[in-house]
Image: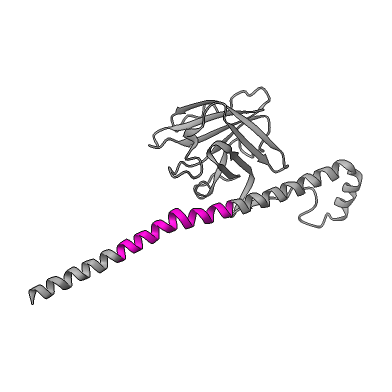
Amino acid sequence: MSANKYGSTLTVILVIAIVVVIGGGGFLFYNYVIKPYNNDKETAQAISEFDKTADENEDQGDQADVDMDKIMNELQQTSGNQNGNSGRKKAYYQEFVMLGYITIPKTNVKLPILEETTPKALETSVAVLHPSNPKLNEPGNTVIIGHNYRNGKLFSNNKKLSVGDKVLIKDTTGRELTYVIYQKFETEPTDASFYNRNTNGVPEITLSTCTDDSQKRIIIFAKAQ
C-alpha cells in the first residue's frame, strides 16, 4: 500500500515537473523567439511608414518653394480646417511620435527615435533626451538614449562600437546624415557635462546607454560627415 502511495506521489511530481518544463519552455520560446520577431516586424513597418510620411512632408516643402502665393491662398481658403496645410504630418511607433530613426550598420540596429523619454517609451525604443523640442540633424548636440537589455536589442551592443564606425540618422524632412564616431568613454549616470558641448555649428549626436552592470554609462560621440 505504501509502495502504491509512493508511486502515486512520484507520478504527481513527474507530471508537475513536465508541466513546469513545458510552460517554462513556452515562456522562453515566446520571449526569445516570437516576441522579438513581432517587435522586429512592427519596427520595420513603422520605419516604412515614417519614410512615406517624410516623403510627403518633403513634397509639401517643395511645393511651398515653387509657388508660395498659391499655398498662402489655399491656406486662407482652408483656414477652418484644423489640420491645415502648414504643419508636417507625424509618424508613430506604437503610440509614440517618431522624430526619425537610427541605423547602426556594425551592430545591425535600425530603430525609431521617439520624442518622449518616459519609462514606457524607453521600453519601446530609443529617444532624444537633449535638447528639449529637438529636431534631428540640426547643428549642435543631440543626446539619444536607449536601454541595454543585454540581449542585442536597443542599445545593448553599443559596447561593440568603436571610433570610426558610422551611425545614420534620418529625420522628418527625409534627410539622412551619416555620423562618424570620434570618441567613446564611460562615465557616471548623473554626468550631463557634455550635453551642451560646442560643436562649432556641426550636427553631432551622443549615444548613451548603461554598462552591463548598470553602474556607469557608455557614451559615444559622433559627428556628421
Please give left or right for residue 113 compared with residue 27 in the image. Answer: right
* Type of secondary structure dominating the magenta stretch: helix
Which span of residues is magenta-colored?
19-43
The answer to if 41 sits in the magenta stretch is yes
Please give left or right for residue 68 compared with residue 220 in the image. Answer: right
Query: x%, y% of residue 60?
Result: 81, 47
Instruction: Tell me the quadrant of the picture where the N terminus can be found.
Output: bottom left
Please give left or right for residue 103 compared with residue 213 in the image. Answer: right
> Quick check: 11 above or below 156?
below
Q: Nearer the viewer, residue 117 or 137?
A: 137
Residue visible at 12% across and 75% down in the picture = 4
* Name of the residue lying farthest toward the left: 2
The answer to if 50 sits in the magenta stretch is no
Q: Nearer the viewer, residue 1 or 42?
A: 1
Query: x%, y% of residue 65?
Result: 86, 41
Query: x%, y% of residue 130?
Result: 58, 35
* Name of the residue lying farthest toward the bottom: 1
Quarter of the image for residue 95 reads bottom right
